[in-house]
C-alpha cells in the first residue's frame, strides 16, 4: 500500500552507511524515512555476503556482515525510522525548501533534506527468465536474498548460482533445510575455503548438487511452489521438489533515476563537498560508496564519518535559526538507553 509521509530527512539506501545516518540524524532530533530497492535492510552486506567477515570496523577484529547490519539496525531503533523497502525513488522535486520524493510503489515523501546512501547506485537482483515468476516472487516462494534464516527451517530449498552468496547460504541452510544447489558447471566462483566446504557437505550427503543444470521452469499453483524444473545444455530435464527457490545471480547496478536529478556526476558517482557531503543541489547530500571527492576511500568507516558530517550540515535546514551545540554521546546519551 502506497504511503504519504512527512519527515525531516529522506535517506535513499538502507545499507550500513544509510542505517548509521539514521542514528546520526536521530541524535540531532531529526526524523528519518529510509527507502531501498531491496526487500531487506543491509544493502550489499545482506544481498551479497551476509556471512562474510568484515575486518576493518573499529573495535571489531572481525564481524559478519549480517551481524554488523543487525547492530546498526538496533542502534537506529530508538529513533523509530520508517523503512520503505522493495521500492526505489523515481523522482525528486524541490519547492520552497521541501523535497518531494515519489517511489516506484507510489509512495510520496516530503522532507527538508535528502541523503543519498545508495552504495553503488540503485540495484536489484538479476532475475531468471522463468514463466510465472512474478507470482512466486509475490508469495515469497522465489527470493533473491535471505532476510531471516529460520524461515527456511524444515523446507525444501533450491539454491541457484555459483558465487559466494549461493555457496554461503547453502552451507548456512543445510543444517535446517533440505538444500539442493544448482549450477551449470562443477567449478564455483566462491571463496576457495567455502567452495571446499560445499564439496565436503555434498560428499557427506548434507547437500544435493544438481550439476551441470540451469533453471528451466517452476511448478506449482502460481503462488505456492512445488518444484523447480532444471535442464542441461543438451535439453535433458529433471524436477527437484521445492518449497523455495533462492536465485543468486548477482545484482544489476546503475545510478538509475539519480542520474536525472541534476547532480554533479563523475564516473557514475555523485560529487560532494568534502566538509558537508552536500551535492551540487542544495539540501541533497551523498554519503558512502556513491559519493566522491578528492582523497575519497571506499570504506564503510569513511561512510560512517560522512553520515555524521551530513547530519550536522542538515540540522540548520530542519531547525533554521536554532543553534546546534555539539555534544558527545557520552554526555547526552541515547533515547531509551
Image (tube, rainbow, N blue to C red):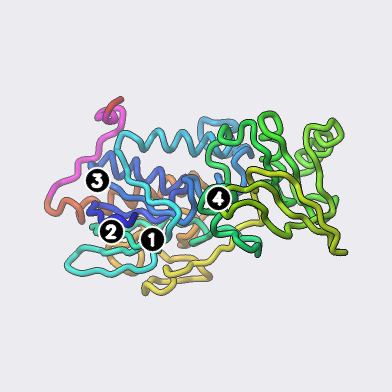
* Residue 255 versus residue 116 in the image, above or below: below
- Residue at point 29% right, 30% down? 334
On the rendered structure, is 143 left or right of 241?
Answer: left
Q: Earlier in the sequence, mark 4 or mark 2?
A: 4
The circle drawn on residue 105 is 1
Return the residue at label 4: 44
Return the residue at label 2: 109
Labels 3 and 1 touching (C-beta < 8 A):
no
Q: Earlier in the sequence, mark 3 or mark 2?
A: 3
Query: Disc 3 and disc 2: Cα gap in Å?
Result: 15 Å
Which quarter of the rendered picture does the N terminus lie within? bottom left
Instruction: Tell me, yes or no, whether the highlighted magenta stretch contains residue 94.
Output: no
Q: Which residues are magenta?
A: 322-335
The mark lying in front, picked from 1 and 2, is 1
The mark lying in front, picked from 4 and 2, is 2
On the rendered structure, is 205 left or right of 16?
Answer: right
Q: Secondary structure at mark 4?
A: helix
Query: Disc 3 and disc 4: Cα gap in Å?
Result: 26 Å
Q: Nearer the viewer, residue 34 or 316?
A: 34
The circle drawn on residue 204 is none
Q: Secondary structure at mark 3?
A: loop
Residue 261 position, x and y percent, is: 37, 72
- Residue at point 36% right, 38% down? 76
Instruction: Tell me, yes or no, whether the highlighted magenta stretch contains residue 325.
Output: yes
Amino acid at each position: 500500500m502506497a504511503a504519504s509521509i512527512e519527515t525531516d530527512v529522506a535517506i535513499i539506501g538502507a545499507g550500513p552507511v544509510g542505517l548509521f545516518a539514521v542514528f546520526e540524524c536521530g541524535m540531532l532530533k531529526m526524523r528519518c524515512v529510509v527507502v531501498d530497492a531491496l526487500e531487506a535492510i543491509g544493502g550489499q552486506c545482506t544481498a551479497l555476503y551476509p556471512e562474510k567477515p568484515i575486518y576493518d570496523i573499529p573495535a571489531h577484529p572481525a564481524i559478519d556482515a549480517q551481524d554488523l547490519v543487525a547492530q546498526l539496525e538496533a542502534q537506529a531503533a530508538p529513533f523509530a525510522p520508517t523503512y520503505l523497502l522493495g521500492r526505489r525513488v523515481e523522482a525528486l522535486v524541490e519547492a520552497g525548501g521541501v523535497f518531494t520524493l515519489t517511489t516506484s510503489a507510489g509512495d510520496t515523501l516530503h522532507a527538508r533534506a535528502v541523503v543519498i546512501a545508495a552504495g553503488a547506485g540503485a540495484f536489484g537482483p538479476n532475475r531468471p527468465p522463468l514463466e510465472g515468476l512474478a507470482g512466486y516472487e509475490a508469495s515469497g516462494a522465489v527470493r533473491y536474498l535471505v532476510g531471516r534464516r529460520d524461515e527456511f527451517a524444515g523446507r525444501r530449498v533450491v539454491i541457484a548460482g555459483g558465487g559466494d552468496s549461493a555457496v554461503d547460504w547453502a552451507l548456512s541452510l543445510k543444517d535446517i533445510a533440505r538444500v539442493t544447489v544448482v549450477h551449470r558447471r562443477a567449478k564455483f566462483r566462491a571463496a576457495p575455503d567455502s567452495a571446499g566446504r560445499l564439496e565436503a557437505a555434498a560428499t557427506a550427503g548434507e547437500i544435493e548438487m544438481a550439476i551441470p543444470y540451469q533453471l528451466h521452469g517452476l511448478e506449482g499453483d502460481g503462488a505456492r511452489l512445488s518444484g523447480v524444473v532444471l535442464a542441461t545444455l543438451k535439453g535433458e530435464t529433471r524436477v527437484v521438489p521445492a518449497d523455495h527457490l533462492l536465485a543468486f545471480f548477482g545484482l544489476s547496478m546503475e545510478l538509475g533515476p539519480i542520474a536525472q536529478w541534476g547532480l554533479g556526476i563523475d564516473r557514475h558517482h555523485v560529487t560532494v563537498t568534502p566538509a558537508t557531503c552536500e551535492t551540487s543541489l542544495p539540501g541533497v547530500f551523498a554519503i558512502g560508496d556513491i559519493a566522491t571527492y578528492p582523497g575519497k576511500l571506499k570504506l564503510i568507516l569513511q561512510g560512517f564519518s560522512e553520515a555524521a558530517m551530513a547530519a550536522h550540515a542538515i540540522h540548520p535546514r530542519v531547525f533554521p535559526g536554532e543553534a546546534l551545540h555539539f555534544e558527545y554521546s557520552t554526555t547526552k546519551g541515547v533515547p531509551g538507553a
